[in-house]
Image: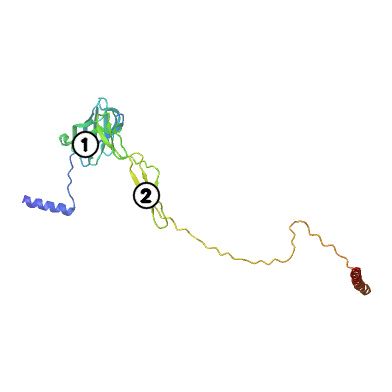
Amino acid sequence: MKKVLSILFAIIILCMGVIPSYAANPKISVKTVSSASVGDTITVSVNLSANSNLGGIEFIVKYDTSAFQYVSGSAKTGNVFSEAIINSDVVGQLHYGGYTTTTVNSSGTFMSFKLKVLKVNGKITVSVRDAFNGEEKDITSLVSVSGATVKCSHANMKWTITKKATCTEKGEKKGTCACGYTTTEIIAKLEHTYGKWTVEKEATETEKGLKWAKCTVCGDKKEQVINKLKPTETTTETTTETTTFVENTTESTTNEPTTAPTPQIVEKTSTAEIVAKTVAVVLGVEALGLVIFLICKKKKGNK
């Protein structure tokens, strides 16, 4: 009969769409940076997991006083507890207490504080002194906690070169941290230092050339192809002879103003004068011929 009722009850719950939920055990965790250097100030928070059904809690956060120095802190309220206090009177401890009139089913931060790093690998721990749920039942033994360790970030390493790098071999260096940590790292090869290029084969229009250069340190040789020369472009010029006809004119080569020619006075000769002059010319020629004749005849007579 009980088995039948259980089955019926389960069927009713499924039909109503109601699924019972069970609160998980409270989990407290410390969150901070995973690594830091000496002199850094870090922020630490103590957090609560969700669905804890926690009504109140009292715990102590302990930190190594040789590794940390307390700076400041505050208790967080709101989504965790409605009332909370933090006490830092005891060196190396932070005493926290908080409660709420309801239950806490959401995740949140109990408290946050700052510590100055004095040395690395310091630990921060939490110990629960009292805890109760929404029904005010003691659940101290059910609360799980996890602390944190701040390791060295090795940000201030001092390096010593144990082997110099060259253009043919890698180098090596050794690092030492103030925390005592040591490590070694490889130094990459150096770049070759090449000298001037030497042309081994000149490039032409039909064949590529070749040049090379050597490293001044190790003698490594690298070659490089010289591209073909571009073909020489030739152009044919056509000379056209032009015959220029120059008019028979006289051009002035100076900027002096052109002087108008002086008009010539032509005297008119009458017809009578022309006839007279013509007769005179004819008679003069005949007279000259007569003189020549007489001279020649005289010479013959003397012989």
Categorize mark 1 by other alpha carbons within 10 Å: few (<14), some (14-19), many (20+): many
The answer to whether residue 78 is above or below residue 298 is above
Question: Position of 151 compared to 215: left or right?
Answer: left
Q: Quadrant of residue 49?
A: top left
Residue 279 in view of the camera: yes
For the residue pair 91 and 7, the one nearer the viewer reads as 91
Q: Quadrant of residue 291?
A: bottom right
Residue at which label 2 appears: 224
Question: Position of 237 compared to 99: left or right?
Answer: right
Residue type (three-letter) at the residue carrying disc 1:
Ile
Residue at which label 1 appears: 28
Q: Residue at x 7, y 51 (%)?
A: 3
Q: Secondary structure at mark 2?
A: strand
For the residue pair 236 and 32, the one nearer the viewer reads as 236
Q: Residue at x 7, y 52 (%)?
A: 4
Q: Horizontal and vertical percent for residue 231?
A: 45, 58
For the residue pair 28 and 172, the one nearer the viewer reads as 172
| Nearest to viewer (mark 1 / mark 2) | 2
Q: Horizontal and vertical percent for residue 73?
A: 29, 31
